[in-house]
């Protein structure tokens, strides 16, 4: 299922500026390596700053925000499962999945394409 199935895209191709900001919304999640909860704060800041200016950027920023909230929930579950030692393996797999999906989404945004992360709980509407 792609973004176009459930949300109407803008009729025109997004401008280079919009595509860049949409890509930044996804890559801002890499703030996770610098600031605690940076993976949520980065897309949130882009969404709050650009949601009134561009539908394309708002859709990508919301998608990135929802994916990173879902990732945080998964990381907390892995933390609990550390008691059973399986949390280490699941946590490593979750981290690799998060990193790969974030890069793919950023590339799709830069191409001007709609993208929806798989296995994402959409809490921010």
Image: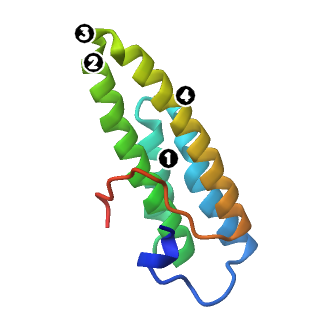
Toward the viewer: 56 or 51? 56
Q: Are marks 1 and 4 in contact (CB under 8 Å)?
A: no
Circle 2: element type? helix
Tell me the quarter of the image containing the C terminus. Answer: bottom left
Q: Residue at x 52, y 64 (%)?
A: 60
Q: Nearer the viewer, mark 1 or mark 3?
A: 3
Give the labeled residue for mark 1: 42
Q: Residue at x 27, y 18 (%)?
A: 81
Q: In whole angstroms, how far apart are the C-alphas of marks 3 and 4?
A: 25 Å
Give the labeled residue for mark 2: 81
Circle 4: element type? helix
- Outermost residue, bottom direction? 11
Mark 4, other Cα within 10 Å: few <14 / some 14–19 / many ≥20: few
State the image coordinates of residue 99 (x, y, percent, origin top left): 58, 37
Q: Nearer the viewer, mark 4 or mark 2?
A: 2
Q: In whole angstroms, how far apart are the C-alphas of marks 2 and 3?
A: 5 Å
Q: Nearer the viewer, mark 3 or mark 4?
A: 3
Q: Is residue 27 left or right of residue 124?
A: right
Give the labeled residue for mark 3: 83
Question: Mark 2 or mark 1, which has the lower sequence index?
Answer: 1
Among the 4 quarters of the image, the one containing residue 77: top left
Question: Mark 4 or mark 2, which has the lower sequence index?
Answer: 4
Q: Nearer the viewer, mark 2 or mark 1?
A: 2
Residue 53, visible in the rendered structure: no
Q: Are marks 2 and 3 in contact (CB under 8 Å)?
A: yes
Q: Residue at x 64, y 57 (%)?
A: 23
Give the labeled residue for mark 4: 33
Q: Are marks 3 and 4 in contact (CB under 8 Å)?
A: no
Q: In whole angstroms, how far apart are the C-alphas of marks 4 and 2?
A: 22 Å
Residue 32, visible in the rendered structure: yes
Mark 2, other Cα within 10 Å: few <14 / some 14–19 / many ≥20: some
């Amino acid at each position: 299922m792609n973004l176009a199935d459930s949300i109407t895209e803008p009729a025109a191709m997004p401008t280079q500026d919009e595509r860049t900001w949409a890509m930044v919304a996804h890559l801002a999640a890499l703030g996770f390596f610098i600031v605690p909860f940076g993976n949520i704060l980065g897309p949130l800041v882009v969404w709050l700053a650009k949601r009134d200016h561009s539908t394309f950027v708002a859709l990508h920023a919301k998608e990135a925000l929802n994916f990173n909230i879902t990732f945080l929930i998964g990381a907390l579950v892995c933390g609990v499962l550390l008691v059973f030692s399986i949390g280490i393996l699941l946590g490593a797999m979750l981290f690799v999945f998060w990193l790969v999906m974030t890069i793919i989404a950023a590339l799709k945004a830069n191409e001007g394409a709609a993208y929806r992360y798989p296995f994402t709980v959409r809490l921010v509407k």
